[in-house]
Image (tube, rainbow, N blue to C red):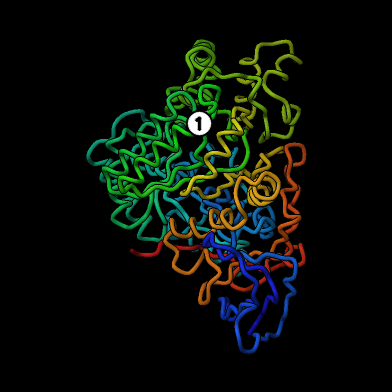
C-alpha cells in the first residue's frame, strides 16, 4: 500500500456511528478498511500516519463556490484546501466565464469583477465549457489545480450570449439557441444549470423560459441550482416558484444558499422547511445548501433595480451619472424595495463595504455605507452612488440581514448540504470563504450540538456527492477515491472572523486528494491533485 492511516476514528459519511480502523490507500483509492474488531493482519504501507485522536472523513464538498478564476490564479488555494474541501462546485448564480464569445466574455468579466477580480491576470484561452474544464485539468504547468472542481452552466451568461441584456421574453430562435448552449455545456461535462434570478440579465427570464432550459438539464441527468428571485419579501413564493417549475420540467432542484433573510423573514424557516417537506413527500427531488453565518455577501451593484441594469455595465454607469435616472434608482431602492435587494427597502446601515477594485477607495472598506456617509456629511445614497461610479461597479458588500434561528433550523434538514458561497476577492471578504466547513464542525457540532458529528459529516460529503451523481466519492469505502480529511474533533474550528477573514482553520492536519497530501501536518504542500470533475451520465 502507499499509505495507511492507523487507529483512526472513521466517520464514513453515511451518518451512522463512527468506528475505529486502519484505512489503507493505494493508487489514489481506498484499498482496505481494517476495523479494530476484524481478524487477520493489519495492512502495511510504505507510509504510516498515526490517526490516534483524529477523525477520518470523506473530503468536504463545497456545493456553492466562487473560485472560477481563483483556481487558475492561486496554485495554493489555501482558502479551501485548508478547510478540507476536496471538491468545489463553481459556475454559480448564473454568471461565469463559459460559454462565451469575445463580447460576452468582456461583459461578464466587468459584471462580476467584485466576485473574481477583473481577470487581467488570466489568459482566457477558452470559450466553451469543455475548453474551460480542460484548462482546469491542466491548471498550472499541466499539473492540475489545488482541489477538484465541478461546473454549472450559468444561465445568465447563456442568456447574455443568446440575446444580450434586453429585459424581454426570448424569441423562439433565441430560446432554441439557449437550449443548444445548455445542452452543449452538459455534453462537455457540466453537472447542471445555475441561475442568479436577482442578477441581470438572468433575472429577465420568465418561468416558461427557465422551464424549457430545465427540461434540457433533466434529459442529461443534471440539476438546476437557482439563486431564486427573492430571499426577502416574497421569499417563500420564490422558493415555491422554483419547486413548481422544476417539477413541471422533471428536473432535480438544488436550492442555492437557502436562507430566509431580512426582518420580514425572522423566525420563518419552519415555513420554508414545511414547503420542502410537502414537495419531497410528493416525490420531488430537492436538495439545498447553506453557509453557517448570518450576513450575506454580494456586490453593491446587485442591489440596484433590474431596469437600471438593462444594457449591461456601461449602461448602468451612464444611468448612475445621470441625475434624473439616479434619483429614480434611489427612490426604488430606499422606498419601494428594489428587486435587486429582494423587494425590501435598503437599510444602508446593514450594507458594509467588504472590497473595492481600486486601491484608492480602500477607505470605504470595513464601514457601512451609512457610516461613510455620516463621516462625509452626506446622504447614504450619495455615498453609494459615488462608490459605484468610481469603482466601476467592482465593490463587494456584506449585508447584515440574517437570523441565527433560521440558520440553525435549515441546517438540520435532511436534504441540507454545505456551501460556502465564498467570494475570495476584496480587502475584507466574508469569513465564510475561509471558515465554512470547520465552523460547522467546531461551532455547530462541538459547541452548540445542533448536529451530531456523524450527521454533519454526511451533510458535507455523501449528500453532496449524491446530488452530483458521483459514484466513487463522498464515502469512506473500499474502492472509493481517497479524497479524505483528517481532523481533530476536539480542536477543529474556523480561524476566520469578520475582523480577520483570511485566517486559516485549526484542527485539520491532513487533507488528501487521490491519496496525495495537499495539506500535511497543517501545511499546504506543492501537490496539485485537483481536476475537473465532469458529469456522470445517468
Instruction: Give residue 435's position: percent from left, percent from top.
Output: 68, 47
**Foreground: 510 or 363?**
510
Report the quarter where the N terminus lies. Answer: bottom right
Q: Relative to 465, is 45 above or below?
A: below
Instruction: Give residue 241's position: percent from left, percent from top.
Output: 35, 34
Is 471 positioned to the left or the right of 259 in the image?
left
Let me know if residue 178 appears in the view: no
Instruction: Give residue 530's position: percent from left, percent from top.
Output: 58, 65
Report the quarter where the C terminus lies. Answer: bottom left
Q: Residues within 10 Å of mark 1 (few under 14, many from 20)?
A: many
Is 36 positioned to the left or the right of 243 in the image?
right
Is 89 positioned to the left or the right of 497 in the image?
left
- Residue at 72% x, 20% y: name it: 372
Is 221 positioned to the left or the right of 103 in the image?
left
Q: Which residue is mark 1?
A: 313
Name the outermost residue toward the bottom: 41
- The local secondary structure at tag 1 comes to helix
Instruction: Give residue 490's position: percent from left, percent from top.
Output: 75, 56
- Residue at 60% x, 27% y: name it: 401
Let me know if residue 154 appears in the view: yes
**Foreground: 143 or 214?**
214
Quarter of the image where one finds residue 73: bottom right
Q: Relative to 305, is 519 above or below?
A: below
Name the outermost residue toward the front: 37
Quarter of the image where one finds residue 282: top left
The mark tally for this picture is: 1
- Residue at 42% x, 56% y: name it: 191
Amino acid at each position: 500500500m502507499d499509505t495507511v492511516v492507523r487507529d483512526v476514528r472513521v466517520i464514513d459519511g453515511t451518518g451512522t456511528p463512527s468506528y475505529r480502523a486502519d484505512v489503507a490507500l493505494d493508487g489514489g483509492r481506498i484499498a482496505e478498511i481494517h476495523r479494530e474488531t476484524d481478524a487477520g493482519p493489519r495492512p502495511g504501507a510504505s507510509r504510516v500516519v498515526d490517526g490516534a485522536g483524529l477523525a477520518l472523513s470523506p473530503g468536504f464538498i463545497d456545493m456553492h463556490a466562487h473560485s472560477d478564476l481563483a483556481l487558475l490564479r492561486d496554485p495554493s488555494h489555501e482558502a479551501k484546501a485548508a478547510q478540507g474541501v476536496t471538491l468545489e462546485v463553481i459556475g454559480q448564480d448564473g454568471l461565469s466565464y463559459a460559454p462565451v464569445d469575445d463580447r460576452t466574455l468582456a461583459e461578464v468579466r466587468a459584471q462580476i469583477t467584485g466576485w473574481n477580480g477583473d481577470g487581467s491576470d488570466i489568459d482566457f484561452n477558452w470559450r466553451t465549457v469543455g475548453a474551460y474544464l480542460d484548462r482546469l485539468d491542466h491548471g498550472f504547468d499541466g499539473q492540475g489545480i489545488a482541489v477538484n472542481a465541478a461546473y454549472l452552466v450559468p444561465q445568465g451568461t447563456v442568456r447574455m450570449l443568446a440575446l444580450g441584456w434586453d429585459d424581454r421574453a426570448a424569441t423562439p430562435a433565441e430560446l432554441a439557441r439557449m437550449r443548444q448552449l445548455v445542452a452543449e455545456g452538459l455534453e462537455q461535462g457540466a453537472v447542471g444549470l445555475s441561475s442568479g434570478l436577482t442578477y441581470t440579465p438572468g433575472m429577465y427570464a420568465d418561468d416558461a423560459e427557465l422551464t424549457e432550459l430545465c427540461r434540457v438539464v433533466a434529459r442529461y441527468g443534471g440539476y438546476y441550482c437557482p439563486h431564486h428571485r427573492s430571499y426577502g419579501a416574497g421569499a417563500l413564493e420564490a422558493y415555491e416558484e422554483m419547486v413548481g417549475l422544476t417539477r413541471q420540467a422533471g428536473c432535480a432542484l438544488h436550492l442555492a444558499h437557502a436562507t430566509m433573510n431580512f426582518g420580514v423573514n425572522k423566525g420563518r424557516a419552519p415555513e420554508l422547511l414545511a414547503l420542502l417537506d410537502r414537495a419531497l413527500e410528493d416525490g420531488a427531488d430537492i436538495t439545498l445548501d447553506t453557509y453557517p453565518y448570518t450576513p450575506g455577501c454580494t456586490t453593491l451593484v446587485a442591489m440596484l433595480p433590474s431596469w437600471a441594469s438593462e444594457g449591461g455595465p456601461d449602461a448602468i454607469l451612464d444611468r448612475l451619472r445621470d441625475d434624473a435616472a439616479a434619483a429614480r434608482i434611489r427612490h426604488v431602492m430606499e422606498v419601494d424595495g428594489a428587486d435587486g435587494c429582494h423587494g425590501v427597502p435598503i437599510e444602508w446601515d446593514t450594507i458594509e463595504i467588504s472590497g473595492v477594485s481600486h486601491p484608492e477607495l480602500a477607505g470605504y472598506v470595513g464601514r457601512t455605507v451609512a457610516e461613510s456617509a455620516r463621516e462625509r456629511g452626506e446622504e447614504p445614497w450619495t455615498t453609494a452612488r459615488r462608490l459605484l461610479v468610481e469603482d466601476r461597479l467592482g465593490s463587494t458588500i456584506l449585508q447584515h440581514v440574517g437570523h441565527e434561528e433560521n440558520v440553525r433550523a435549515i441546517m438540520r434538514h435532511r436534504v441540507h448540504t454545505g456551501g460556502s458561497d465564498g467570494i475570495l476577492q476584496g480587502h475584507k471578504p466574508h469569513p465564510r470563504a475561509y471558515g465554512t466547513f470547520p465552523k460547522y464542525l467546531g461551532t455547530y457540532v462541538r459547541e452548540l450540538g445542533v448536529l451530531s458529528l456523524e450527521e454533519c459529516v454526511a451533510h458535507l460529503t455523501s449528500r453532496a456527492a449524491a446530488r452530483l451523481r458521483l459514484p466513487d466519492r463522498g464515502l469512506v469505502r473500499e474502492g472509493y477515491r481517497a479524497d479524505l480529511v483528517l481532523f481533530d474533533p476536539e480542536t477543529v474550528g474556523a480561524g476566520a472572523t469578520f475582523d480577520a477573514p483570511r485566517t486559516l482553520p485549526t484542527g485539520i492536519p491532513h487533507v488528501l486528494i487521490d491519496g496525495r497530501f495537499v495539506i500535511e501536518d497543517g501545511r499546504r504542500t506543492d501537490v496539485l491533485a485537483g481536476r475537473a470533475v465532469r458529469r456522470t451520465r445517468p
